[in-house]
Image: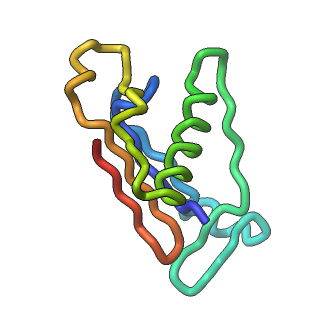
Amino acid sequence: MLIGMKVQNFTSFNDLTAFSMVASNKLRKQKERLYESDAISLLKSTVIYGSNVSSKSNFVEVLRFIKECVINPKISIESYNWYCRNHEDNRENIIFFSSIVINKVVLFKI
């Protein structure tokens, strides 16, 4: 289960962007919306919404890419060439992924 992730310099994500399923203190009072274990309270579901051209599809691409990297760790990440094209300098910058999965932490820097 994906608990959270961070991404930078990938498709339309120029700046470091974070996603988390960890419940805030405000939501911890609404038990029906949470999955709880001894260690952590997580949201059971989340919704991604926004206007046109607001990176919703690219968010799904990030998830798909992280899934591929977890399933096939020997994947040639450099061949994707998915740096953020908002700034031409990004071609030389690192593409950063960080994912937190229950029982496993996966970090990718390209």
Could you tell whether 21 is left or right of 7 in the image?
A: right
Instruction: Establish if 53 lies above or below 77.
Output: above
In the orientation shown, which residue stands out farthest toward the right?
32
Could you tell whether 55 is left or right of 109 in the image?
A: right
In the orientation shown, which residue stands out farthest toward the bottom?
38
Disc count in the image?
Answer: 0
Q: Residue at x 52, y 43 (%)?
A: 65
Could you tell whether 10 is left or right of 59 in the image?
A: left
Location of residue 82 in the rendering, given as x and y in whole percent from the top left corner: 41, 27
Location of residue 102 in the rendering, given as x and y in whole percent from the top left corner: 53, 73
Location of residue 72 in the rendering, given as x and y in whole percent from the top left corner: 49, 57
The C terminus is located in which quarter? top left
Instruction: Establish if 91 lies above or below 47.
Output: above
Residue sitting nearer the eye, 51 or 83: 83
Q: Residue at x 73, y 71 (%)?
A: 31
Say which quarter of the image contains residue 42: bottom right
Say which quarter of the image contains residue 91: top left
